Amino acid sequence: MTQLAENNADGHDVGVLISQMKLFDDIGEALRSRFVEASQMRLVPKGKILYLQDDPADWFYLIVNGWIKLFRETLEGSEAIIDVLTEGHIFGENSVFEDDSYSYTVEVIENSLLVAFPTSLLKEAIASNNQLALNMLTSMSRHRLQQHREIEHLNVQNAPQRIGCFLLRLCRADVQGAVTLHLPYDKTLIAARLGMKPETFSRALAKLKESAKIRISGPTVYIDRVESLIEYTCNHCSTSFPCDDLK
Amino acid sequence: MTQLAENNADGHDVGVLISQMKLFDDIGEALRSRFVEASQMRLVPKGKILYLQDDPADWFYLIVNGWIKLFRETLEGSEAIIDVLTEGHIFGENSVFEDDSYSYTVEVIENSLLVAFPTSLLKEAIASNNQLALNMLTSMSRHRLQQHREIEHLNVQNAPQRIGCFLLRLCRADVQGAVTLHLPYDKTLIAARLGMKPETFSRALAKLKESAKIRISGPTVYIDRVESLIEYTCNHCSTSFPCDDLK
């Protein structure tokens, strides 16, 4: 793990980054400065395991750019992907409520620039700064709703619809007509993120292409009429496009 | 909905019930009294819809006894069960972070005794009482881990293993050898809770009976050797029996 001097990399300023994080909204300048001072910028290469499930949790992270995946491993060795996160997301912060250990393994899947903050400071600060506790509750609550939607989809949507939903969540809220998208990471990982075996994913994708008029070439997806995809997918969901959490 | 006089039903005392709720641990006697005074005991009959998804959220609830289910409905009418809860659980409290509306529909599935608390009081209190905010964070974090486990299972376990996990979570942590269990609610609902169509559930149950030496008669489940069931199920999970959150 590369730790850079003077808390900056690629011209990023930690103070500015922190001022954009909802977690730190209205917590006061003094506390915010403590987080800035205690932070470390880290450039982490693709393929690096940042930490393992059950490791002691010393740091939590903000993703400045790049991609990471959170997963858990079963006793017999399968990997269950819990989430794949990018720019603007934080992770590892929940460990302060979970015996100070991480509840999943994190692997960096594209070269990533991360800001690391000590969990000890977070733990101390939420105990005295009510606004920080409220910000964390708001963020956790939003996350919980996303998980509910995910459990709902695993329960009631078929595989092509789940891929359709994945694609729609990459679209802008005001999208109309023909759309071109770029897949954010490779298809094997998308399959795993959606809880599908590669062969299920291939069959489901073929079905989706036919049903919702979609073409895929490498990482590029061409959607003829996004309205058709919305109809095909969102009729089998309890919310409609665009999802509340993406507005 | 039956609202009972003097805040009691079946001899339950709200003050005592509240003193057992982790949510109210160490929040101070004055605030606790305000919750007691503002609470209402409600006996709600089986089949009653307590509230609908997107309804304005005026109350959150503690289950004293009985069973409720949380679900969301898709546009084309399928029901996705998010959770089935019983004694000691609270629900609806998250609405204070979700635009003061409920994010799922709640149906009472067995006659239930509930204590209702105003969400307005909760909202006001977490903004000023840091301990209450911390208690809520702890509870939400535990819930999040359970959801991660659920997403993991939907991703990596097959249907018989998911039923096995459901049964094991009904067992005591120190269980050994032969075990007799009672299903907490009917098989159709268990199937829906596990995200399975009834026919998938039947096939999976048949497979589980054969693989893990289980017999079922009405609501009673006979497990010959719980160790076999643990091996069959928990090898396909990232944690082993007994689950951390049930200890």
Image (cartoon, coloured by chain):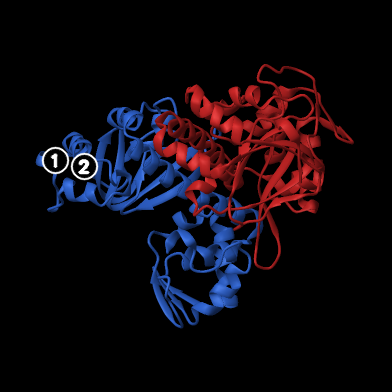
Chain colours: A red, B blue
Q: Earlier in the sequence, mark 2 or mark 1?
A: 1
Label 2 sits on what residue type? Answer: Arg
Label 1 residue SS: loop
Q: Are marks 2 and 1 in contact (CB under 8 Å)?
A: yes
Q: Is residue B17 left or right of residue B170?
A: left
The residues bearing labels 2 and 1 have C-alpha atoms spaced at a distance of 6 Å
| Residue closest to the eye, A187 or B183 | A187
In front here: A203 or A100?
A100
- Helix, strand or loop status at disc 2: strand
From the top left corner, tell me how far across and down residue B203 is, in percent: 59, 65
Residue B207 makes an appearance in the image: no
Give left or right: position of B44 versus B149: left
Kindly identify which residue carries mark 2.
B42
Is residue B29 among the parts visible in the rendering?
yes
Q: Which residue corresponds to the image point at 42% horizontal and 78% vertical from the top-left?
A: B179
Residue to which mark 1 is pinned? B4
Q: Residue A33, image x and y in percent?
A: 55, 27
Co-location on one chain, circles 2 and 1: yes
Q: Position of residue A118 (x, y in %)?
A: 58, 42
Residue A43, position as x, y percentages in the image: 77, 38
Q: Residues within 10 Å of mark 1 (few under 14, many from 20)?
A: few
Q: Is residue B154 left or right of residue A125?
A: right
Q: Going 15% across and 51% down the picture, which residue do you hit?
A: B12
**Residue type highlighted by circle 1:** Leu
Q: Is residue A176 left or right of residue A33?
A: right
Q: Nearer the viewer, residue A140 or A164?
A: A140
Chain of the residue that carries numbered disc 1 in the rendered image: B
The answer to which image quadrant residue A205 occupies is top right
